[in-house]
Image (cartoon, rainbow, N blue to C red):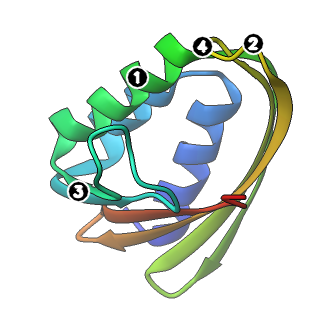
């Protein structure tokens, strides 16, 4: 698959709320995922599909998503970006907020092997 093919499929999965299906079909087993903030365990970076799925599980357990908007993709060579806008409530704090996030992906041999998320941290 080309980078455009992978990007289009990821966006389609995300718009349908099928993020785990995207991980299962589009991600390299050696995926590296980087966040703007450190996680509860103190790291910003995780490696491997199981770790990425663990992040997704944590997100779902700790956030109620009221709405999600997915914009993109924008493709440049082996990279593509997607903008995500979420209206969420953080379950532990009860605080509702709008989260605006830019995700950058790298594709190698038809699979996403790196993702990095950019969003305000303060």
Q: Earlier in the sequence, mark 3 or mark 2?
A: 3
Q: Earlier in the sequence, mark 1 or mark 3?
A: 3
Q: Secondary structure at mark 1?
A: helix
Residue at which label 2 appears = 94
- Give the spatial CA distance, label 3 vs label 2: 32 Å
The answer to whether mark 4 and mark 2 are in CB contact below 8 A is: yes
28, above or below 49, in the image: below
Residue at which label 1 appears = 58
- Give the spatial CA distance, label 4 vs label 2: 6 Å
Residue at which label 3 appears = 31
Please name the residue shown 55% across and 58% down the image.
Answer: 7
- Give the spatial CA distance, label 1 vs label 4: 12 Å
Residue at which label 4 appears = 92
Who is closer to the viewer here, 98 or 12? 98
Mark 2 surroundings: few (<14), some (14-19) or many (≥20) residues within 10 A: few
| Quadrant assignment, res 67 | top right
39, above or below 72, in the image: above
Who is closer to the viewer here, 106 or 33? 33
Q: Quick one: quadrant of the N terminus?
A: bottom left
Q: Is residue 74 left or right of residue 30?
A: right
Please name the residue shown 49% across and 25% down the image.
Answer: 59
Q: Secondary structure at mark 4?
A: loop
The x and y percentages for residue 27 are 29, 49
Q: Earlier in the sequence, mark 3 or mark 4?
A: 3
Q: Secondary structure at mark 3?
A: strand
The x and y percentages for residue 89 are 76, 18
Please name the residue shown 72% across and 61% down the image.
Answer: 120
Q: Earlier in the sequence, mark 1 or mark 4?
A: 1
| Quadrant assignment, res 119 | bottom right
């Amino acid at each position: 698959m080309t980078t455009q093919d992978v990007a289009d499929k990821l966006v389609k999965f995300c718009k349908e709320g099928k993020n785990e299906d995207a991980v299962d079909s589009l991600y390299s087993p050696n995926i590296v995922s980087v966040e703007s903030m450190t996680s509860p365990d103190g790291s910003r970076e995780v490696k491997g599909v199981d770790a990425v799925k663990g992040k997704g599980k944590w997100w779902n357990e700790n956030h109620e998503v009221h709405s999600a908007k997915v914009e993109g993709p924008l493709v440049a060579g082996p990279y593509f970006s997607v903008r995500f806008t979420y209206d969420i409530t953080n379950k532990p704090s009860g605080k509702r907020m709008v989260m605006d996030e830019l995700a950058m992906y790298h594709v190698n041999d038809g699979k996403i092997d790196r993702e990095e998320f950019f969003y305000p941290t303060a």
